[in-house]
Amino acid sequence: MQLARVRGTVTATAKDERLVGQKLLLADLVDGDGAVVSPARVAVDTVGAGRGDTVVVTSGSAARMAAGLSTLPVDLSIIAIVDRVSAD
């Protein structure tokens, strides 16, 4: 799992039929301080995240384990909205 910050939405009129009804968001992977480490990744939202939210994402085969995504061509899913990050 990694932290990310949602930058916006991705709209795709023509897409795999299994993605119809799925919300796609543009997110930057970030470190614990909020610095971007990997920009502009597309993720399927499973929790109702929005622009500016810090979220937890999961990638690879684990991304398809999120709510009802087992048959979708997905490799990045938003699985939580972060309330706070605390580090020593």
Image: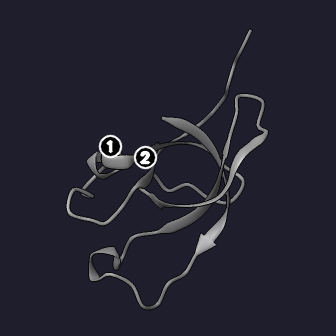
Q: How is the image coloured?
A: one colour
**Which quadrant of the figure contains the C terminus?**
top right
Q: Decide: is 36 above or below 75.
A: above
| Residue positioned most to the bottom | 14
Instruction: Count all numbered tags in the image, as a single digit.
Output: 2
The residue identified by callout 1 is 62
Measure how far apart labels 2 and 1 are at the Cα level: 6 Å
* Residue 5, position as x, y percentages in the image: 67, 49
| Residue behind mark 2 | 59
Label 2 neighbour load within 10 Å: few <14, some 14-19, many 20+? some
Q: Residues within 10 Å of mark 1 (few under 14, many from 20)?
A: some
SS at badge 2:
strand
Examine the rendered structure and indicate whether residue 22 appears above or below residue 6. Answer: below
Tell me residue 43's x, y (percent): 50, 59
Q: Is residue 14 left or right of residue 28?
A: left
Q: Amino acid at mark 1?
A: Ala
* Element type where label 1 sits in the image: helix
Q: Is residue 7 left or right of residue 69?
A: right
The foreground one among 9 and 16 is 16
Residue at 61%, 71% in the rendered image: 9
58 sits left or right of 55 in the view: left
| Residue in view at x 37 percent, y 48 percent | 60
Picture quadrant of residue 81:
top right
Residue type, numbered disc 2: Ser
Residue at the extreme top of the image, as rendered: 88
The image quadrant of residue 71 is bottom left
Question: Residue 75: where, in percent of width, then height?
Answer: 40, 56
- Residue 66 percent location from the top left of the image: 31, 48
Q: Marks 1 and 2: in contact by CB < 8 Å?
A: yes
